[in-house]
Amino acid sequence: HPISAMGCLGMYALLNLMSVTEVSYGCVASVLGYCLLPMVSLSSLAVFFSLQGILGIILALVIIGWCSLSASKIFISTLAMNDQQLLIAYPCALLYGVFALLTVF
């Protein structure tokens, strides 16, 4: 999917600019894909229930937070980027927000 490829390339570039150690594209794609798993549960709920109400929006926000915080924790622990979790979590939340928008609507 072009959205995931562009998101992985963007995070790859960002992480290589911010960290001292170099990270591979495969590592970035693996972490982002692994942390996308809660979004899969949200999309499976969307099959049976409509997520376009207030409950769906709240649930999507919780899932976006869960995905982005777990991805940022893995990135900062792997790359030894102490005290930079929020700087990594924000672009992750933007990427997972796009997937949530695709799921809800």
Image (spheres, rainbow, N blue to C red):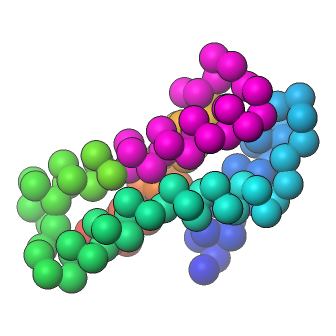
Question: Residue 102, how many percent across, how many down?
Answer: 37, 71
Relative to 12, say whether 5 is above or below. below
Tally of numbered tags: 0
- For the point 11% across and 75% down, which residue is it? 49
- Quadrant housing the N terminus: bottom right
Question: Residue 99, how many percent across, how many down?
Answer: 43, 65
Q: Is residue 92 left or right of residue 14?
A: left
- For the point 42% across and 55% down, which residue is it? 97
- Quadrant housing the C terminus: bottom left
For residue 3, what is the image quadrant?
bottom right
Query: What type of secondary structure mainly makes up the magenta span?
Result: helix
Question: Residue 59, how many percent across, how many down?
Answer: 21, 53
- For the point 38% across and 50% down, which residue is it? 64
Task: Please tell me which residue lies in front, 71 or 88.
Answer: 71
Question: Residue 93, how many percent across, how many down?
Answer: 48, 46
Q: Is residue 32 left or right of residue 43?
A: right
In the rendered structure, which segment of residues is drawn in magenta? 64-86
Relative to 88, say whether 92 is above or below. below
User: Can you see residue 18?
Assistant: no
Outermost residue on the top side: it is 83
Q: Is residue 39 left or right of residue 79?
A: left
* Residue 69 on the magenta span: yes
- For the point 57% across and 35% down, which residue is it? 73
Q: Is residue 103 left or right of residue 79?
A: left
User: Can you see residue 47?
Assistant: yes
Relative to 99, say whether 61 is above or below. above
Task: Please tell me which residue lies in front, 16 or 31.
Answer: 31
